[in-house]
Image (cartoon, helix red, strand yellow):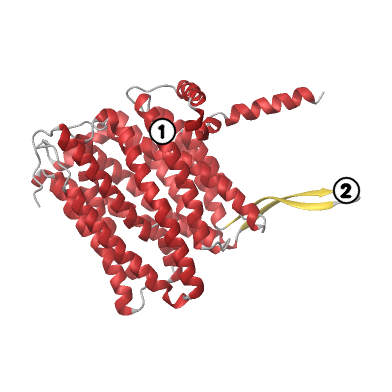
Amino acid sequence: MKLTPKEVLTEEEIRHGLNMVIWDGLAAEIMTSFTSGAFLVALAILIGANNVQIGLLAALPMITNLSQLISIWLVRKYNNRRAVAVFCAFLARTPLVLIGLTVWWTTDISVNILIFFLFFYYFFGSIAGPSWNSWMKDMVPENMLGSYFSKRSRYTQTVNVILSIILALLLDFVKNRYPQYELYTYATFFIIAGGIGILGGYLLSRAPEPQSYLTSANIFSLFTLPLKDDNFRRLLVFNSAWVFALNIATPFFTVFLIKSLGLPLSYIIVLGIISQLFSILTLRIWGIFSDRYSNKSIIRLSAPLYIACIIGWCFVGIYSHLYANLALLVIIYILSGIATAGINLSLTNVGLKLAPKGDAIVYLSVKNIVTAVFSSLAPLIGGFLADYFTDIKILVTAQLSSPYYSKLVKLLSLHEWNFLFLIGALLALVALEFLGRVKEVGEVEKDIVKRIMRTSIKNNLREYFVIGNIINWHEQLVAILKRRTKKTP
């Protein structure tokens, strides 16, 4: 396996490399579809994990991001980002196979063993991350960063949608008909995921790497560069506050659906698929506008929408009617899919954009390490808070009564996980205030981008109908209220 970088890449080599990166992304998405998200939470609950352990599972990817220091040392020592990324990808994906084999060999697995193997899965994945990011920054033309990665995300999410529903239906079938084989089904998932992940590492090795030239400065002095950069430091503050706010709440959404609402796994996966479908539908749009205007403007449009979705979780489960809760969840997941598509794409791109080309790996690693500290603390704190709020409940009601009718209406019910959702939403609102301090090249005011998007959407109604109503919802509501006010007199 020849992994030597090249001085100059031809257009054909770049085109081939971009295709290989997409194929590796598809393999990685298949791997994560089998082993993460709702499936991992359901497995953890099946083997008896408590709230703190679930929080620790959610925190592992962020805790192990500290290993990115090793990535920088390896890249500086060997000056070969592709070799670091590929070999660490192989090492990261092998523990998934070991988890599956452990279940088959011992007929049992504890939460601690699961955490042990997943630690190495995330550890080596974190080492591969900075090398991969720096490699991609040099290989992918800057003028197509948004469109290329939105295309890659559309492909991977499409695979995730199809695969997730098949796996969820299979798991529900096994759970209902053959419950004694449920754990073995998860074990098989991990073995398949590890095998496909290793294949993805091979495909990634076939993408070329342009030669990089690293500074010979002391590694510790290098890490002070991003912190001395005022603008990049502002980005770190916003990103850290944002991920902390979200990770207080989001890891416990699936736990809430399984434990409080008792939803089957297939229902939860379908809700996730609905979110991903709307994310896929809007990714291309967000990518186009992030390339044309600015990532900050996209975040300012999509972040408040996502915060509203987190607040919406506080109202799920107020009433016992299944269909009413499902209807609210569908709305939340649709809007979440639209919002997260814009947020995730823009956060990735703005980090790549603000990182100087020569020191990109250092800047991106510092960004990942700093945000990892806050990301890992949040779900751990969330787990403790969930236990603390277990016996605390706030119920807000309204009494509607007349001589012929009396009805008690629940307006708000907070307990256990709902408290986390409200806390996360409030912290996210605070975090959003830090975004205004970040300066981005080519930045365009949010209102201008909104106006341009509105015009574009009207001219391309079929393609953009989803975002069209989203960015105008507040104006439409005001207009309706004004019309009703005029009619009332």
Q: Residue at x 17, y 44 (%)?
A: 207
Percent of width and height locating residue 148: 30, 36
Residue 110 found in image quarter: bottom left
- Give the side of residue 332 with respect to residue 51, left or right: right
Q: Give the labeled residue for mark 2.
A: 402
Q: Is residue 158 above or below residue 139?
A: below
Question: Closer to the observer: label 2 or label 1?
Answer: 1
Q: Secondary structure at mark 1?
A: helix
Label 2, residues with CA under 10 Å away: few <14, some 14-19, many ≥20: few
Q: Give the labeled residue for mark 1.
A: 286
- Give the side of residue 206 with respect to residue 240, left or right: left
Q: Is residue 155 visible?
A: yes
Q: Residue furthest right?
A: 403
- Give the side of residue 464 with respect to residue 89, left or right: right
Q: Residue at x 47, y 37 (%)?
A: 303
Percent of width and height locating residue 67: 23, 52
Q: Which mark is residue 366?
A: none
Label 1, residues with CA under 10 Å away: few <14, some 14-19, many ≥20: many
Q: Residue at x 31, y 44 (%)?
A: 370
Q: Residue furthest front?
A: 462
